[in-house]
Amino acid sequence: MKQQLEQIRIAAVAEIEAADTSLEEIRIKYLGKKGELTKILRGMGSLSAEERPVIGAVANEVRNCIESALEVRGAELKKIALARSLEAEKLDVTYDAIDPNAGHIHPITKAMKRMTEIFIDMGFTVAEGPEVETVYNNFDALNAPADHPSRDFQDTFYITENTLLRTQTSPVQIRAMLNNPNPPIRIISPGRVYRSDVADASHSPVFHQLEGLVIDKGITMGDLKGILSTFAKTMFGPETKTRFRPHNFPFTEPSAEVDVSCFVCGGKGCRLCKGEGWMEILGSGMVHPEVLRAGGIDPDVYTGFAFGMGVERVAMVMAGIDDLRLLYENDARFLKQF
Ligand code: DAH
């Protein structure tokens, strides 16, 4: 019997040490109610009174030995299981993140927002007008002569005889005046305009302008120059100079085109300004008396100035590019840079 017990001990310990997952089955096999050790202990009834305590002691020792082997291996298996699950859930924090490819604001929208902000800070409010406009608001009320070339079908998208896709944001001037019969008026109007142009480096059939209109008693060209040079310095940097060149627009008298000193070369001439040192960004002038009248405002009491800025021009200057099409092709590799 002693030998049998010894064999059980050896077999059990060997099995326990080799166990890879659960020890429960082995425990039942040896120590359970119908287990091998129990079976032997049951047979102890047939032993003599002298043998019984001796075998009993050996049996106890075997049980203790199996139990402690189970405990040791149990602890080892727990450690192995932990290591395995850590390995399985291993996280490489140096691995490249997945590019979520988030969209962002288009350079034209960005330029328009920034321009709008600057004028809002100077006390302007934003006025809006429709993209499908009347021929009257887009041309007649703005004092465009009946034979003005811009009225031509080749230059303008007409919807009907009397409506068109606005060619400029200037018709918002008329709407703003009619909506505010009692000046002061101090509005800007950013928006989309249309011309029947073939797309090239400096033309697009759809583009954006930002219109401005200020009307009050005693407004002079000095106010125009002050507002626009403040805008230019805020937009392009404090060193920026402005240059007013005489021009002609039907809706202003006198009129001026406005250039800003190139913010890349500071006026010396470079690739961006094509060696000029200056970049044209807008048209402006004192509102023509006929336009004030069309807006229901008495030109003997009030004067005003207006300006119209090319948003794409400004966006291109900001982005340092010289081809308008880059802004419209929507190549994500290009747009991502801004
Ligand atoms: N509407 C003109 C254009 O599209 C730009 C312009 C020039 C607007 C002078 C004005 C202005 O308000 O006073 O070319």
Image: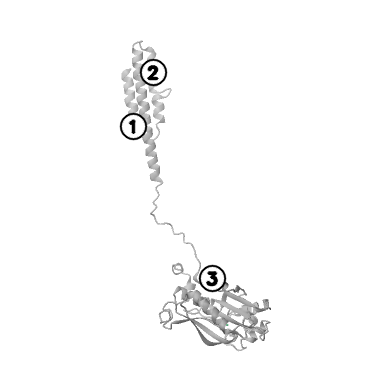
Q: CA distance from mark 3 to mark 2?
A: 92 Å
| 145 vs 103: above or below | below
| 233 vs 28: above or below | below
Question: Where is residue 177 shown, x and y percent of the image?
Answer: 65, 79
- Which residue in the structure is indicated by mark 1? 17
Q: Residue furthest top?
A: 49
Question: Where is residue 107 shown, x and y percent of the image?
Answer: 49, 71
Q: Indicate which label's residue lies in the foreground, 3 or 2.
A: 3
Q: CA distance from mark 1 to mark 3?
A: 74 Å
Q: Secondary structure at mark 3?
A: helix
Label 3 CB-ligand 1 distance < 8 A: no
Q: CA distance from mark 2 to mark 1?
A: 24 Å
Indicate left or right for 79 with 259 as reference.
left
Q: Amino acid at mark 3?
A: Lys
Question: Where is residue 304 shown, x and y percent of the image?
Answer: 61, 82
Whether residue 20 is visible here, answered yes or no, is no
Mark 2 burial class by Cα count in 10 Å: few <14, some 14-19, many 20+: some
Instruction: Say the numbered circle drawn on residue 113.
Output: 3
Q: Nearer the viewer, residue 188 or 4?
A: 188
Mark 1 burial class by Cα count in 10 Å: few <14, some 14-19, many 20+: some
Q: Secondary structure at mark 2?
A: helix
- Which residue in the structure is indicated by mark 2? 41
